[in-house]
Structure formats: structure tokens, C-alpha cells
């Protein structure tokens, strides 16, 4: 049974990422090679798909490296746009419709500043979802994962197999969990004192 990185410090095993190209699922990446392109690589969103433009002569290994780099750059650009509580609630409604058949209907979804050991929390009896302000500025796929995690709690309170089956519908679950685990691990690293200037 998976361990919940949102509410626990234990780390579940990581699975290898799937292929980065092809497929029509949300979050799919399409790589387009161009003979006219010599050195530049660019990327943009096209609906639920990300299009990465690369030179035709690029190797498979270079392609994979550049796709990862460009996905991270796009995520960083998108994360600079801070969402208010109303936009957060709209996002939760869209995610519920897309991945949970619209069955999870929170009464409230809001940012809070008093959650420093959790990324999110949910009170099913009240239908309330609270997300830590620390998620602001993280990639959108991470925010979506945390929102979906809490939405799933409106349907299944615990972390049993039924709960994790609901999250299996989101294609970036493992990547988002890995990102959050990395943030937690980085916070635990000893901070070296700043170098003194002579």
C-alpha cells in the first residue's frame, strides 16, 4: 500500500517515468523535430498537451534531456501566477470533474498559512479543503496533485487501496510525489554557514 507523502515522512518506492512522447492523455508531450531548426529548443502548451520543438538531428538521449528541461521551465513560468481562493476552488472543481467524475464537491477550498508540516488537509464532514501557502510557486502539476489528494479524501477518508485507486487516474501522481519528497528532503539537509568575505 502506498505511503502518503502529504501526511507522513516515510518515502514510498519511486517508479520509473513512462515515455514522454505520444498519447492523448492530459499532460501528454508531443515532440516535433524540424530540419530547419539547428540549435534552439522551445516548448508551449496546446490544450492539455505540451509541444516541444527540437532540431531533427538531436539524439534520443538529448531529446529526453531537453523535454525534461522544457517541462520544468514551463512549470516554473506557470507557477509564478499566484491563484486566489476563488481560482483555487475553480481549479478543484475542474480536477474533480476530470479525474473523479465530479463526485468530490468541496464546500470551501482555500490557502492557509498555519500548515507547515502538511501540504494540505481536508475535513470531509464540512467539505473543506485547506492548502499550505508553501505550495504557492510550485509547478502546477504538484498543486493539482495535492488538490486531487484532498478531493479524494472527500470520497474516501483514509489512505486505503480505494483511496489510492482514485489517485491512479492522475497521470503525474508519481512525479508530483517525487517533487514533494525532494522539497522535504532538501529542508532536512544541514544548512552550511554563508562564506565570510575576507
Image: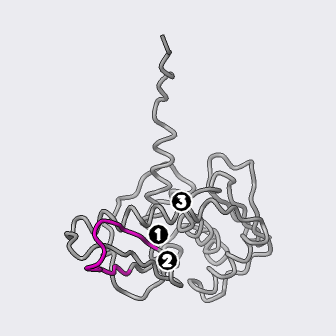
Q: Nearer the viewer, residue 103 or 41?
A: 41
For the residue labelled by badge 1, is the local secondary structure a helix, a strand or a loop? Answer: helix
Residue at 33%, 75% (x, y): give it.
Answer: 20
Q: Is residue 17 left or right of residue 107?
A: left
The residue that appears at 47% across and 69% down in the rendered structure is 173
Q: Are marks 1 and 3 in contact (CB under 8 Å)?
A: no
Labels 2 & 1 near each other (Cβ < 8 A)? yes
Q: Position of residue 86 (x, y in %)?
A: 79, 71
Instruction: Tell which circle, 3 or 2, labels the residue nearer the N-terminal end.
Output: 3
For the residues labelled 1 and 3, the Cα–Cα distance comes to: 18 Å
Q: Which residue is mark 3?
A: 76
Dot 3: element? helix
Q: Is residue 195 above or below residue 80?
A: above
Q: Quadrant of residue 144?
A: bottom right
Q: Position of residue 89 (x, y in %)?
A: 74, 73
Q: Earlier in the sequence, mark 1 or mark 3?
A: 3
* Spatial separation of the CA atoms under disc 2 and disc 1: 6 Å
Residue 33's place in the image compared with 77, above or below, is below
Amino acid at each position: 500500500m502506498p505511503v502518503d507523502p502529504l501526511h507522513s515522512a516515510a518515502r514510498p518506492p519511486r517508479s520509473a517515468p513512462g515515455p514522454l512522447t505520444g498519447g492523448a492523455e492530459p499532460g501528454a508531450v508531443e515532440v516535433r523535430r524540424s530540419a530547419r531548426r539547428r540549435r534552439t529548443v522551445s516548448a508551449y502548451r496546446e490544450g492539455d498537451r505540451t509541444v516541444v520543438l527540437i532540431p531533427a538531428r538531436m539524439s534520443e538521449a538529448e531529446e529526453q534531456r531537453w523535454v525534461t528541461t522544457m517541462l520544468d521551465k514551463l512549470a516554473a513560468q506557470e507557477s509564478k501566477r499566484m491563484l486566489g481562493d476563488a481560482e483555487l476552488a475553480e481549479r478543484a472543481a475542474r480536477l474533480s470533474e476530470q479525474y473523479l467524475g465530479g463526485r468530490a464537491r468541496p464546500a470551501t477550498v482555500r490557502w492557509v498559512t498555519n500548515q507547515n508540516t502538511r501540504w494540505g488537509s481536508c475535513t470531509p464532514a464540512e467539505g473543506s479543503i485547506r492548502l499550505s501557502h508553501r505550495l504557492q510557486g510550485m509547478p502546477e502539476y504538484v498543486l493539482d496533485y495535492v488538490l486531487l489528494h484532498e478531493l479524494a479524501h472527500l470520497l474516501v477518508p483514509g489512505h486505503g487501496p480505494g483511496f489510492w485507486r482514485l489517485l491512479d487516474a492522475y497521470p503525474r501522481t508519481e512525479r508530483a510525489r517525487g517533487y514533494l519528497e525532494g522539497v522535504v528532503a532538501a529542508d532536512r539537509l544541514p544548512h552550511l554557514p554563508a562564506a565570510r568575505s575576507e
